[in-house]
Image (spheres, coloured by chain):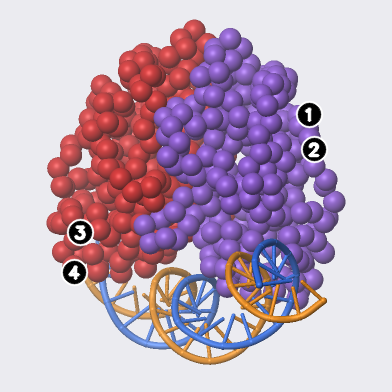
Chain colours: A purple, B red, C blue, D orange
Amino acid sequence: MDVETTLSERPRYAAAIADDVLRAGNRLRHAFLQKPMRFAPPDEPIVRLTDSEPPVILIHSGFVFRCCVLGDGRRAILNIAMPGDFIGLDHLVLHRATEEIIGAANRVGYYALPPSELWSLMARDQAINRKVVTLLAEMRWRSDRLAASIGRLDARARICVMLLDIYERLPRNGLNSGLTFNLPLTQEQIADHLGLTLVHVNRTLRRLREQRIVLIERQTVIILDLDRLRECAEGLPQVAELVEVCRNDRHIPVL
Amino acid sequence: MDVETTLSERPRYAAAIADDVLRAGNRLRHAFLQKPMRFAPPDEPIVRLTDSEPPVILIHSGFVFRCCVLGDGRRAILNIAMPGDFIGLDHLVLHRATEEIIGAANRVGYYALPPSELWSLMARDQAINRKVVTLLAEMRWRSDRLAASIGRLDARARICVMLLDIYERLPRNGLNSGLTFNLPLTQEQIADHLGLTLVHVNRTLRRLREQRIVLIERQTVIILDLDRLRECAEGLPQVAELVEVCRNDRHIPVL
DNA sequence: CGGCGGATTGAAGGGAATCAATGCTTGTGG
DNA sequence: CCACAAGCATTGATTCCCTTCAATCCGCCG
């Protein structure tokens, strides 16, 4: 593998702690599952900026994103999370959220754990502690990747990277992994995530459709030509080592 | 304070753990200071992609950045760190670096701690553990902020945000805090950091100079009009609460 | 001196934003 | 059941920020 392709591969975890972290991940999930499931209707933020002591969240169903609104009213979506993902780990150290956490389109089911409980869990169980550190590092890697993607790729490549990323995260989270999957995001939300405008996302999707690479209709993504999709996403190309990643990070689906 | 300005303020840490973390930060630094100081000549990476088991680093002198090269040879600089900053905390959980860590322009002095030693430190000392989690969360916030900045602001605003950010981090790290400071980055590196081209950075700097807002000459930044600089950086405006941040995060300078 | 990396500037082109108008679904209420 | 509104998707025309290509200049160093 080429040294140049680094930001593209998913990070690989040190072997010594991999299995350890794997099992700890399941214990961590288990702790969340003890909590009652909550639901957020669409358009109802899960975490608001005004909330004090916001919880850490494990998503059960539906897509969720973190977003912030800029001075001029424009919006930036920093992170898209799907069932099985944790979100809001920053709340471990922040007494107020820095971004809102909002459900996308459909109804969201989730488990919420207060930071204090997670801290004591981490203090008692060193492996869970490592899992949390691992999650934080992975999210940082993801944020960096987004910044590089927005800064250095054109609209077409950015969209392809995003779609491939979601496509490859789905099976990790125990979700359907076919070439067709559900993506409950509006084009405006995609635009806000990728630093584009709604209009330009639309045009770019049309071109991808005309070239028979990928088809997005309503909220369904159909990958028509996976190889060419990968080509388009090159620059920061995709996952070379899904196998090892799965070994290190697979978990019991929460669904 | 406006709810809309969130990603702009530095994160505020939960009061309960603030002092705790403050003292732990100094213990953490102390652990790094036990190591022999190392030096990296300019153009000599501190951490390479090929390194296995890369260390965590505390910077003593000089500026340092993390960067990755894309498929087409273009580069993305994801993070700029200055004396007093930690870098490479991701190496706690990665057995190979995802990005190179490179010194900028001048000679870099640093302390390096193997991940295994940091882990045992964290296991022994819960407060240090919290400090590390806090640092990781802060870096993620910084990465998110960069992504939002590149995605939603124009060249002028991006540059102003970057300059203000550095200007305000300097005193936190025990460095000179006047309106004039040293910025050992080439225009090309600034461009790679902000998702622009060298040429356009140059033009934008010229306009900022003509408007008598900020002057960059050689590697010296002179802020001519701090208020207007803040105006330009609006959108994700700057630090509203430097006081609280300092209280929570000031540390003994390592110089 | 010559070479080199960085900075500067001009001219031309393109990708994306903006402005604006029109469909298309969906949900709501009369 | 239809009318209507609202939100999202689609498309065209125009503008402009930024890139690309190219040339020059400057300070530095062997």
* Separation (CA) of disc 4 from disc 1: 59 Å
- In the drawing, does residue C4 fall left or right of residue B230? right
**Mark nearer the viewer, 2 or 4:** 2
Q: Are the numbered discs 4 and 1 placed on the same chain, yes or no?
A: no
Q: Are the numbered discs 1 and 3 placed on the same chain, yes or no?
A: no
Label 3 with label 4: CB-CB less than 8 Å: no
Q: Is residue B220 above or below residue A38?
A: below
Q: Are the numbered discs 3 and 4 placed on the same chain, yes or no?
A: yes
Query: Residue B202 at what x, y percent from top left?
Result: 31, 65
Give SS at disc 1: loop
Foreground residue among B209 and C17: C17
Label 2 with label 3: CB-CB less than 8 Å: no
Find disc 4 in the rendering and name its residue: B210
Label count reads 4
Residue appearing at x 27%, y 42% in the figure? B240
Dot 2 crowding, Cα within 10 Å, few <14, some 14–19, many 20+: some
